[in-house]
Amino acid sequence: MKRFNADAMGEKLLRRLAGGSSRRSMLSRLGAALVAAPVFPLLPVSRAEAAKPDRSPEAKTGFARNAQTKDDTKCDYWRYCAIDGALCTCCGGGLHSCPPGAEPSPVSWVGTCINPDDGKAYLIAYRDCCGKPACGQCGCDNTDRETQLYMPQLNNDVIWCFGTSSMEYHCSTAVMVGAAS
Amino acid sequence: MRRLLTGSLLLLGLVGIGRAALPPMGPLPDAISDPELARSDYAEHCGGCHGIQGSAAPAQLPELRGRVGWFLCTPQSRAYLIRLPNIAHSRISDNQQLADLVNFMVFGLGGPSVPAGAKPFTAQEVERERKFALSSASLKAERARYVEVAIKQCGAPSAMRLLYPGQKP
């Protein structure tokens, strides 16, 4: 006698299936699958692929839902949705300005943040201030729309002190570029 | 009081950051289905490094403003723009949306550098060329090659050999 008989096993399986299921249950399952199929394109992955970026309140990130618009020295200030580093507002600079002695980098990391006051999306350039030792105050790491480091242009861990006289990182600003459409 | 405050800020030596506003629309080809979105996409996906207004000098990056249009000189150099890794592999998956972005960059920022009669990119062209992303070629060598062609065939200025006008060697 053979130890492994695929034929017998297959027969056993099919007979069990035939005995345990009716044609009607098969039809009802098929029907349910047909009805359920169109629901799947509504899943977020599919919506993210839509031609226009989804700026609706439902598409808000966790950051945007909890962001505030009053205190720009806190990590949850709305413009800091993708900032990584020390806030220049805590280091003697401002939202748009580097602290004395630090030099703004000509390149930046651009993020899209939602202003909770009007619910609209804005483009924010995170411009590093360079050429001075690290400030070390108010360290934040918010990650809206950021990806892993293997795509460096979409990662905000990179120090963007290119084109400055020194690559030493001091702090980050959050410059308003304009409304995102 | 406000003036006093501004004055003291200046004295403190705070370094303001300019050139952060969105660039003006300028004359754009009708092929762009949504110019506002194209400009916004440019700022979001390219403007960080290449500059919101198309210039990031003195950072070591090719300046786009008034220059990038020269790459429409030949079919090969057109294809080169779409095959650039960050364009070909852009997270904009819709080819028309990506064509709009590139057309905004070329015609909106490149302006007078577009050779006469050059046609805007179509979604079909983008779809075809982005499959051939330059993943192993030297981007510097590729750029240098197409710059020479643009200088010879389309009359691009010799400063195109530099990353930006006035770049120190």
Image: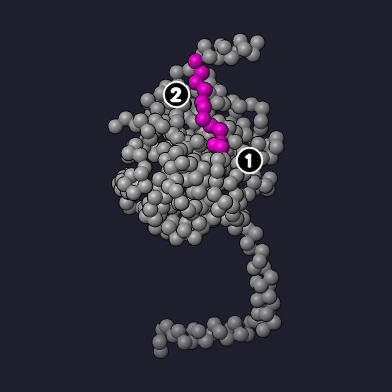
Pick the front one: A90 or B73: B73
Report the predominant secondary structure element of the magenta stretch: loop
Quarter of the figure with the N terminus of chain B: top right
Q: Verify whether residue A89 appears in magenta.
A: no
Say which residue label 2 marks: A103
Instruction: Give the spatial CA distance, label 2 vs label 1.
Output: 28 Å
Quarter of the figure with the C terminus of chain B: top left
Q: Residue A121, which numbered label? A: 1
Where residue B48 appears, as percent x and y from the top left, is 48, 38
Where residue A103 appears, as percent x and y from the top left, is 44, 23
The amino acid sitting under disc 2 is Glu
Where residue A120 appears, as percent x and y from the top left, is 66, 40
Mark 1, other Cα within 10 Å: few <14 / some 14–19 / many ≥20: many
Residue placed at 66% from the left, 32% from the top? A68
Residue span colored magenta = B13-24
Q: Where is B112 relative to B20, above or below?
A: below
Mark 2, other Cα within 10 Å: few <14 / some 14–19 / many ≥20: many
Q: Is residue B23 left or right of residue A106?
A: right
Where residue B100 appears, as percent x and y from the top left, is 53, 50
- List the single residue furthest toward the bottom: A1
Q: Residue B157, located in which quarter of the rendered image?
A: top left
Residue placed at 63% from the left, 58% from the top? A43
Q: Which chain carries label 2?
A: A
Q: Verify whether residue B21 appears in magenta.
A: yes
For the residues beneath circles 2 and 1, the answer to whether they share a chain is yes
Pick the front one: B65 or A113: B65
Q: Please tell me whether mark 1 sits on a helix, a strand or a loop.
A: strand
Residue placed at 55% from the left, 14% from the top? B9
Q: Please tell me whether mark 2 sits on a helix, a strand or a loop.
A: strand
Q: Mark 1 lies on which chain?
A: A
